[in-house]
Image (spheres, rainbow, N blue to C red):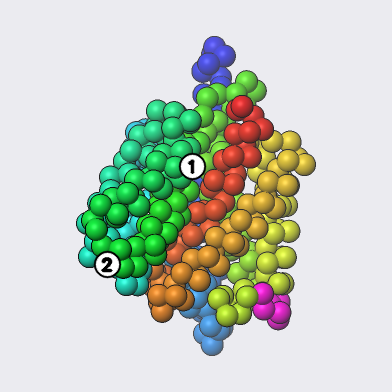
């Protein structure tokens, strides 16, 4: 076996290990809640079972994106952004007729952004939506000639693109990062790390909050968020991140610090979307996941964790 074949084998081995771990946790959780419900029928496990079903769906999407051909992965992530943008745009209040005719440019931006990620053209990738589309969308709104509430539209549409397209596209760009000497897991390992750590953080902030939550953090926006859940979640996430560092080029200290950053960013992403839904007077952004809302409801944390993780890794190891 030559060096190249050996590296491919190691990469597959590490990726398969974390996929097995994810599936094992989901199987254990599903079995636990089923048995728990049989033993103690009075237990209120509806929310836990619903969340577990949604985690199965999201895990399937990201595992699929990890193991298939890279082109299929980029298409899958592009569709994820497409659905997420449609969801957040559909719940926006007071959408003007002029905005509807400009929104087409937002949809056009999605395949362009993912093509840039696929090609690995970092310099244009990083400015296309935050700079080029930030200028283009207001310009297209202005030439429509309707100025009433135009400032609101100029703010909303670029923000929606940032939350649902620019942010999530960093997950795809991980697959385009060049190989690093001595780092076998590659972009697929990085992708699995950020997705798994983000979801683990969501899970444990929810679990610790349910078990020990007493003190609310931002009750008016997210009444279920507590300091106990937040602190318990970030500590648990940091510990798990330390043991999963083999999926990244990070050492132990870096893995802990980055995991803490992911945990905090995930919390912020969650409450940002909660605030948007409260403004719209809705509980969920959509119905794509039966019983647990839309796609954006499940990837809200990734809207901040993905770019935060990407730029830390990129600046530490790829610049």
119 falls in the magenta region: no
- Residue drawn at 67 percent across, 78 percent down: 216
Circles 1 and 2 in contact, beta carbons < 8 Å? no
Q: Which residue does the numbered mark 1 point to in the structure image?
A: 170
Q: What residue does disc 2 label?
A: 96
User: Was residue 213 drawn as part of the magenta stretch in this picture?
Assistant: yes
Q: Is residue 158 above or below residue 2?
A: below
**Residue 98, how many percent across, how many down?**
24, 61
Front-most of residues 136 and 40: 136
**Rendered position, 136 above or below 31:** above
For the view shown, which residue lies furthest in the top direction?
Answer: 2
The residue lying at 64 percent from left, 56 percent from top is 263
Q: Residues within 10 Å of mark 2 (few under 14, many from 20)?
A: few
**Which residue shows up at 57% across the image and 80% down it?**
220
Q: Would residue 285 be visible to someone looking at this image?
A: yes
Tell me which label, 1 or 2, sits earlier in the chain. Answer: 2
Question: Quick one: SS at disc 2?
Answer: loop
* Relative to 144, 115 lies left or right: right
Instruction: Count the marks.
Output: 2
Lateral position of residue 8 relative to residue 246, left or right: left
- Disc 1 crowd rating (10 Å Cα; few below 14, some 14-19, many 20+) is many
State the CA–CA distance, disc 1 to disc 2: 30 Å
Q: Is residue 116 above or below residue 234?
A: above
Residue drawn where x is 40% and y is 28% of the image: 119
Q: Quadrant of the C terminus?
A: top right
Residue 318: image location, x then y, percent: 60, 28
**Under tag 1, what secondary structure?**
helix
Q: Which mark is residue 112?
A: none
Q: Foreground: 56 or 146?
A: 146
Residue 168 is at least partly visible in this image: no
Question: What residue range appears in magenta?
Answer: 211-217
């Amino acid at each position: 076996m030559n060096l190249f074949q050996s590296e491919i084998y190691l990469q597959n081995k590490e990726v398969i290990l974390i996929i097995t771990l994810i599936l094992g946790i989901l199987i254990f959780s599903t079995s636990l809640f089923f048995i728990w419900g049989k033993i103690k029928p009075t237990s209120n496990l509806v929310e836990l079972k619903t969340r577990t079903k949604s985690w199965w769906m999201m895990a399937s999407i990201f595992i699929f994106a990890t193991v298939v051909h890279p082109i299929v992965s980029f298409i899958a992530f592009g569709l994820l952004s497409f659905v997420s943008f449609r969801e957040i745009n559909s719940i926006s209040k007071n959408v003007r007729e002029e905005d509807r005719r400009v929104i087409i440019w937002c949809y056009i931006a999605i395949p362009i952004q993912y093509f840039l990620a696929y090609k690995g053209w970092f310099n244009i990738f990083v400015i296309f939506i935050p700079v080029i589309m930030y200028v283009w969308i207001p310009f297209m709104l202005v030439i429509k000639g309707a100025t009433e509430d135009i400032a609101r539209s100029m703010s909303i549409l670029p923000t929606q693109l940032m939350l649902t397209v620019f942010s999530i596209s960093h997950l795809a760009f991980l697959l385009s990062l060049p190989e690093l000497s001595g780092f076998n897991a590659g972009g697929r390992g990085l992708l699995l790390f950020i997705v798994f750590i983000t979801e683990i953080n969501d899970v444990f902030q929810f679990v610790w909050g349910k078990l020990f939550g007493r003190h609310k953090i931002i009750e008016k926006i997210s009444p279920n968020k507590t300091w106990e859940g937040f602190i318990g979640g970030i500590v648990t996430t940091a510990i798990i991140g330390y043991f999963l560092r083999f999926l990244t080029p990070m050492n132990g200290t870096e893995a802990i610090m980055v995991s803490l950053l992911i945990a905090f960013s995930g919390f912020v992403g969650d409450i940002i979307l909660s605030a948007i839904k409260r403004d719209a007077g809705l509980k969920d952004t959509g119905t794509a996941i039966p019983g647990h809302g839309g796609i954006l409801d499940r990837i809200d944390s990734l809207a901040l964790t993905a770019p935060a993780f990407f730029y830390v890794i990129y600046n530490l190891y790829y610049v």
